[in-house]
Image: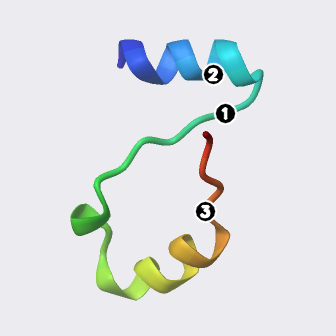
Amino acid sequence: MDLKFFLEDLFKCKVDLVVIEAIKPDLKKYILENVKYAT
């Protein structure tokens, strides 16, 4: 959870960290279409 809070402080927005394989199949397409990658 430390990484999540660090990233939220850095980007000043809510951050969700997930492992792609852990996403339920019925939600996976929607989530991956709306994902924003930070670089």
- Where, quadrant-wise, is the C terminus in this rendering? top right
- Of the numbered discs in the image, which one, if any, rests on residue 28? none
Per the image, the residue denoted by label 3 is 35
Task: Tell which circle, 1 or 3, labels the residue nearer the N-terminal end.
Answer: 1
Q: Residue at x 63, y 22 (%)?
A: 8
Taking depth in this image into account, of 30 and 7 the one nearest to the observer is 7
Q: Are marks 2 and 1 in contact (CB under 8 Å)?
A: yes
Q: Residue at x 68, y 15 (%)?
A: 10
Q: CA distance from mark 1 to mark 3?
A: 13 Å
* SS at circle 1: loop
Q: Amino acid at mark 1?
A: Lys
Point out the residue furthest to the right here.
12
Q: Are marks 2 and 3 in contact (CB under 8 Å)?
A: no
Q: Residue at x 52, y 73 (%)?
A: 32
Task: Tell which circle, 2 or 3, labels the residue nearer the N-terminal end.
Answer: 2
Q: Is residue 29 left or right of residue 33?
A: left
Q: Is residue 15 above or below residue 25?
A: above
User: Where residue 1 appears, x then y in whole percent?
Assistant: 35, 19
Per the image, the residue denoted by label 2 is 8
